[in-house]
Image: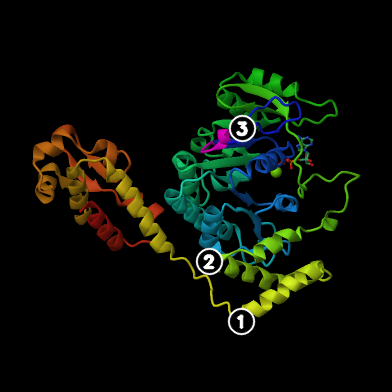
Amino acid sequence: MGSTMKLDIHNRLSFKPEDFIGECVAVLGRRGGGKTNTAARLFEALHSHMPATIIDIDGDYWGLRQQLPNIILVGMLPRADLMLDIEKAPALANYSLDKGVSVILDFDGYDNDGVRDEAWVADYLYTYSLALWRAMSKKRTPYMMMVEEAHEFVPQTGGHAALKKLLRKMALRGRKRGLSMLFTSQRFANVSKDVLSQAGIMFLHHATIPNDQEVYAGLLGRKIGEVQKLMAGMANGNGQNFGLIVFDQKKLVTTQMRLRETYHSGFTPGFNTSAVDSLPINLVSHDWLAGLDGELGKALVWHSFDELIKENDKIFADNKRLRELLGVQSEAGAHLKIVPTAPDLAAIQMADLEDELRAALQNSPRYHSKILAALVKFSGRMSTGLLAEKAGLSVSTIRKNPPVRNLIKPGWINRFGDPGSRSYGFNWAKLTGEYDLLDSDAMRNTIIRVSA
Ligand SMILES: Nc1ncnc2c1ncn2[C@@H]1O[C@H](COP(=O)(O)OP(=O)(O)O)[C@@H](O)[C@H]1O
Ligand SMILES: [Mg+2]
């Protein structure tokens, strides 16, 4: 697919774009150690092969649009092409995957109006990611999800339960769908171990806290003293350490990343840095957005320019080209009947439940479905005898081959008691966390229908 990516200044890394397909990538290190630079450099080198969604909490990535085509910047500040709008999140996710267009979800300034909070961010990400995940089950194509500050979204404990569960699932099961996940974190001791342990490629930047070095030692399967020695050897002599350890299960390399080629808006200001505000916004991208085909494209763009008219006057006032575009859009506005409708989240969850159940039953013998249907119809536990009767099976079938792997282990049903006196029950707890928008009758009916 591609030639070797130019990632590090010493040219010690020889990754090709395809090495990242379906891979889980961890980019870790202390604050200011170069994680965002590494992630952005990876994006620059990958994005023509593998579009991505970047979850950008601090507004560090919009500079990517300066030089790279086909990126939609979705945010809250005037620089954005589109506003972060939870109702349009699923349409956006589908669009990104369908057209191979990258999306930066730039949450910088999300709480400027004092209305939105962290829970809103998590809800947005859940809605967006769920749509992406579902779409990926139908369209397998290389795609990357980049999650900055992963400790916020997939913490070891706490966090937004549904989002965390979904992101874990994406990390664990994404490979089959061609989905790559990249997580960055400075508080990686707090990132879910399940997720970290999935990382097949790691970019480990300088870490000073012993606890963090301990995590590195664990991830690399080395002694902490060895890790400390490696890291000490990466200092550049100016008291800085932008060195990193790159590990891909096969080999370990120490090197230093190249600086990203596009503008780094989140750079650490020094004495000689030029004014951030003077960066020209890439209008080619607006032009391209305005030309997008399809009703969805128009609707999204209209939303964008609508917001731009209101919020962006100052920045774009003297830009003739954009005013022309706005003029076109204003006229077009009269014809624009497409208002993206709010996604039916419950319907999405229901379809997900069906997917998950079908996957569980796919390789199961027929009598597993009968057991499941009988249990879900009945509230409470059933003895093996009663279950056999209700499911129309013989007791010995259930005794000899209980559905351990497909139904008990994944948590669809619970098994109680000793081998001599088993009882079984449907495990509602499994569903109520993940499918929190569905009522139990609806879920029961679906399960009965799918297992029929
Ligand atoms: N490989 C590198 N070489 C030189 N400077 C770097 C490198 N990586 C990062 N920097 C500089 O260090 C600062 C912090 O980098 P950043 O990627 O934002 O760190 P982090 O995301 O880990 O907090 C930036 O100003 C960046 O330009
Ligand atoms: Mg950063």
Residue 154 position by quadrant? top right
Q: Type of residue at label 2?
A: Glu
**Residue 339 at x, y = what percent?**
54, 73
Tell which quarter ligand 1 is in.
top right
Q: Nearer the viewer, residue 431 or 3?
A: 3
* Residue 432 shows in the view: no
Q: Distance between the residues labelled 3 and 1?
A: 48 Å
Q: In which quarter of the image is the N terminus?
A: top right
Mark seen at residue 334: 1
The residue at which mark 2 appears reads as: 87
Q: Distance between the residues labelled 2 and 1?
A: 22 Å
Image label count: 3
What's drawn in magenta, residue-wise?
18-23
Q: Is residue 20 magenta?
A: yes
Of all residues shown, which one is farthest toward the right?
Answer: 272
Residue 30 position by quadrant? top right
